[in-house]
Structure formats: C-alpha cells, structure tokens
Amino acid sequence: MASTSGLRTTLSKMAASLTGLLKPWTPRVLLVRWSRYNPYYLEPEPRKEVYHIPETELTPEQKEERELKSVRPIKAATNSVTSSVFNDPVLSKFVNMMMKDGDKIIAKGIITQTLENMKRKQVEKYHKAPEGKKAEIECNPYAIFHQALENCKPVIGLASIQKGGKFYQVPIPLTDNRRRFLAMKWMITECRDNKHRRTLMYEKLSQELLAAFSKEGNVVKRKHELHKMAESNRAYAHYRWW
Amino acid sequence: MLLLAGPCFIFVAKPTEQHLGQYYTVPPSHFHTVFPHGLPPRYQQQVKTFNEGCVMVRQPALELISHLKRADYSKPTLRYLLYGVKGSGKTMSLCHTVHYCSTQGWLVLHIPDAHLWVKNCKELLPSSYHASRFDQPIQASNWLRNFRTTNEHFLSKIKLRQRYVWTKRESTEEGRPLGELVDMGVSRVKSSSDVVGAVLKELRLQAGGTEGGFRLAVAVDGVNGLWGRTTLKKEDKSPVAPEELTLVHNLRKMINNDWCGGAVIATLSQTGSLYAPSSAYLPQELLGEEGFDSMDPFVPVPVSLYSEKEFESCYLYYLDRHWLQHPHSQTEEGKKELIFLSNRNPSVLERLCAFL
C-alpha cells in the first residue's frame, strides 16, 4: 500500500512539474498495455494519410508536432485501433458492448456473422426483385446498421429527480453519447432476452436491425414509449435545474 | 491474355485455355441433378444468395479435363489427385470436373466427403455378409439416395450380371435393372451398405464393356480419410480400423486401378481429417504410407492460390453481383487491403468479402 501511494505522489509531482521542466525523459519501468498513463505521453496516430504527406507539404504546426513526437514517449496503441480503411468506430463500440468476459473474438465474430446475414438477405431480395424495385433495396449492411441505430436513438430521456420527499420522472435532454449508448443497449438486451431460445444471436440481431431500419420492431417501440412517457411528464420539466 | 473489363460469363460446357479466369454459369436445372451433395456449404449459400451458380475456370480443372479427354479408356484407370493448401479450391475444381463429366454423359460416382464415413456414426451394425466388418446404414442409404438423383437415366439401362441374395426370402435376380437394386438399398436400410458394395462391383465390371459401355467417373473428396484412423469405437471400446467398415472396404476396391473404362478423381482434405496436423497438405503427409502405396501411381494435380488475374476476376465478379457493399472495398486502397488480408486464398477472400 505504501509503495502505490508513493508512486501516486511521485506521478502527481511529475505532472505538476510538467509546466516547468519539459525535457526528454524515459521512465525506468515502461508501461506496455495500460490505460492510465503519465500525461507526458502522447496519443498514437493510426491513420495512414498523415504519414504519406511528403516533407515539403507540411504546415509549420505539423512540422512542430513531428518534432515533438520524435522526443516524447507515445502511449501503446490498444488492440482495437487499426489503420484499416474498414475501421468503423460505432461498430467497434457496439462490439465492445456485446462483449462478455473480455472475449472480443466471439463478439466480433457474432457482429461479422450478423453483417453477412443481413447482406445475404438483402442481396437475395435484390436479385429476385423486378427492375423497378431494385433501386429501393438497401444492400449495404453498414448503412443498414447505422440507419437502424439512428432510428433507435431516443431524442429525449427521463431522469429521476427528488423534490419534496417524492421522486419524479423528469424529461431531460440527452447527450449524443448517451443516446447512442441507449440505442445499442436496448438493441442488445432485446436480442438477448425477448427472442426464441434456440435462435442464434446473429440471426436475432439481423432480424432486429432490419426491422429497426424500416422503423418497426421492439426497439423502436421502446423508444416511442420513452418519448410518450416524457411527453406525459411535461409538467415536471421545470424540476430540471441544468 | 486480354484484360477483361468485367467478369466474363460464358455458357460453354467445354472450357478451353482462353477461358482461364472467367466464370462459367452452371444451368440451374443441373444443380439438383448433378450436385445433390458435393458442393461446399458456403458455395451453396452463395448460389442461393446470388440466384445463380458461377464457377471460375481455373488451371487445375482445365488440366484434369484435358487429361480426361485424351486418356485411353481400354487401359487400366488413371487416378488423379488434387492437392493444395486449405481453401485453395480443390473441392470446387473437383465439382467443375464432375459437372464436365456429367455433361459428357459419363456415370458419376461422387462421394462428397470420405471423412463423413469414418467419424460421427451413430449406428454401427455388424455386417451380415462378413463377420468382422461393420455396416453404416444411415450413411449408406443417404449416399444411395443422392446417387439415384444424380444418375437417373443410367439406372434403367444397366443390368445386373449376378444374383444377389439379401435374406432367406429376398434376392435380386440377374438381369434386373440397377435402379431396382438402388431402390431396395434406400428402402431396406439395414442392408444398404451391402447394396453399396454390390452397386460398386457391378459398375466396376460393366464400365469398360463394349456393348452399352459407359464411362465411369469416381470422384472422392477427402480420400485421405480412407486410410488412417477412425474415431469410431466397437462395443468393447476398442477402436475400429477403416478396413473393418464395409463402405470403406468397397470404396478402396473401387480406387484400385484393376478395372478399365473410367477415371478416379480424388481430393485430399485436411479440414475434415482425423489426427492430421493442420499444416499438412502434401499427399505424402495426408495419405500416410499405406494410402500412398495404394494410390501410387497417380497423377498429382496441384491447386494453387489465386493468381493476380484470377483475383481480379473474383473481385470483379463480387462487384458485379453487388456483394462488395462497403464503400471503401470498391476503392484501390480497399482492394490492396483485401489482397494483403487474404493472401489471395480463395476461401479466406470469400469469408472477408462476406461481411464487407
């Protein structure tokens, strides 16, 4: 216990002295895969385009940044960071939310199977549809996923606020992150709980996502119910003080 | 070679050197007759999704077809062995050759996966014909049903040359059509393994014959399962050797080159194999000593990963069928990434493009 508190005080002293002495400094014990870093460490840059700019076309700020990066230590990149063109941050967040016990391989496998399943259903419909209807069928599973998530995001939320000994459900605005989190959470819980026991997760997810894309299905219903509750509790809106 | 602007779809049943890398469409009516079993499951899903079945014309299949065209069928049978790394397209080349043979009017004996006969058998009956052998009724009757679908028109033409006695009261006389034997095998599940043996023997005897002669193509996928070990156990928990299974015993006799008038086309497969390391793909490693000695001499046909032209063709085919939907996968960057991730391995590329 004494050693960890000693370490913390050393780190806070180092952080406090940052503004004073910025000198090239490597720690004795190198952190490889940690989320807590000394603020001295810089973020890694995974995008390929940044490294392809030739020397001549760099702006002064970019030149300065490169100078800085050559002397300062850089945090280790996590496993989910890629320079791949197919990287999708929203999808990565969804995979993390699906994950249980840190098993990302299984969660990623389920998501890829879901995307494949959705694409198969849509492409089959596309190939069997007559010429006029082909343009209306959306075959891109990523577009369907993003649109379905948009359709599930609630616009307004409820918070439990205590006033005069009783708790009231007060409508409050939600941040973007909270809305995205709620949409994903509802989608996952819906698929886990309310479906037939024997269907596999990717099948359940693909059915629910396709339904949400066309604004049907249980998740969109839940969003509408939340909106209705918020509408009915309009009177308590002034209990919110922020 | 001309650079194609898009994937070319050709409809000839006889592919030639010019058609390398192009896709040829199998008519939908052929799918249920020629391939009731035998196509890889992911390919079957692809056929269902795209509403059509297209096969790429590749070098190993063309080589096999040219050998089959020029072989002398009065000499003992030639054995062809397709080998390659996992996912390089051995089963698809085999299916291409099988389709060619059936369009040329050959009788095709297609065993979809020999490994299925040496593992996961729920019912193992002691054989009535031979005391120390074991029968597999379910596998045998399934195979007979599919055989019947594939070769409908041959079943009435071929007549039996021997009398077969099944039980005290049941027997099939000489001169009856083969179809009757096959129907009996499908309906009487208990003796279906012996029926399979009888069918194979009859076909072997009659294949090279001058009157009403037909050519026989024996296509076996995963032939390395016939030699090696099984996971089946007898009632006293001792392991069953492959020779002790009736189906395997009869199939081995078929693969011997002591008959004439046809060809044996086989594929090695590590995917379903038992007790074989996952990095093994060469004939020596997968067949083992016994298998190699039985198959020797054979014509080895190596199946390699996609060449640049073939990869282009596959990529353009997926684009044409609206399978590559991710906006970045249609750019040059995405294509380079696909080449890097899949290393031009056909099955890995297929799995990657499935979710992109």
Image (cartoon, rainbow, N blue to C red):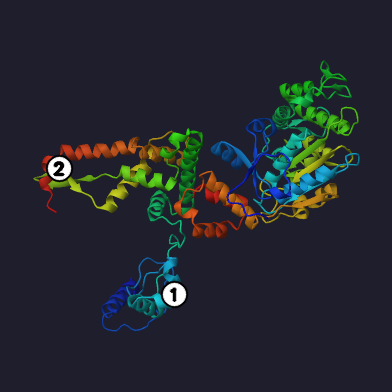
> Separation of disc 2 and disc 1 at Cα?
60 Å
Mark 1: give few (<14), some (14-19) or many (20+) Cα within 10 Å. Answer: few
Q: Position of residue A189 (x, y in %)?
A: 36, 42
Question: In percent of the image, x 22 and y 39: which residue is there?
Answer: A227
> Is the residue at mark 2 from the same chain as the one at mark 1?
yes
Quadrant of the drawing holding the N terminus of chain A: bottom left
Q: Position of residue B16 (x, y in %)?
A: 73, 46
Q: Which residue in the structure is indicated by mark 1?
A: A54
Q: Position of residue B201 (x, y in %)?
A: 85, 31
Mark 2: which secondary structure?
strand
User: Is A240 located above or below residue A21 in the figure?
Assistant: above
Pointer 2 or 1: first along the chain: 1
Q: Residue furthest top?
A: B169
The amino acid marked with disc number 2 is Tyr
| Viewer-closest of B4 and A91 | B4
Mark 1: which secondary structure?
loop
Mark 2: give few (<14), some (14-19) or many (20+) Cα within 10 Å. Answer: some
Q: Tag on residue B330?
A: none
Q: Chain of mark 1?
A: A
Residue A68 lies left or right of residue B82; in this view the side is: left
Residue B156, by quadrant, is: top right
Question: In percent of the image, x 32 and y 42: which residue is there?
Answer: A151
Q: Position of residue A217 (x, y in %)?
A: 35, 35
Question: In percent of the image, x 62 and y 41: which residue is there?
Answer: B54
| Viewer-closest of B167 and A53 | A53
Q: Which residue in the structure is indicated by mark 2?
A: A168
Q: Chain of mark 2?
A: A
The answer to whether residue B227 is visible is: no
Residue B76 lies left or right of residue B243; in this view the side is: right
The amino acid marked with disc number 1 is Pro
The answer to whether residue B326 is visible is: yes
User: Is B197 located above or below residue B242 in the figure?
Assistant: above
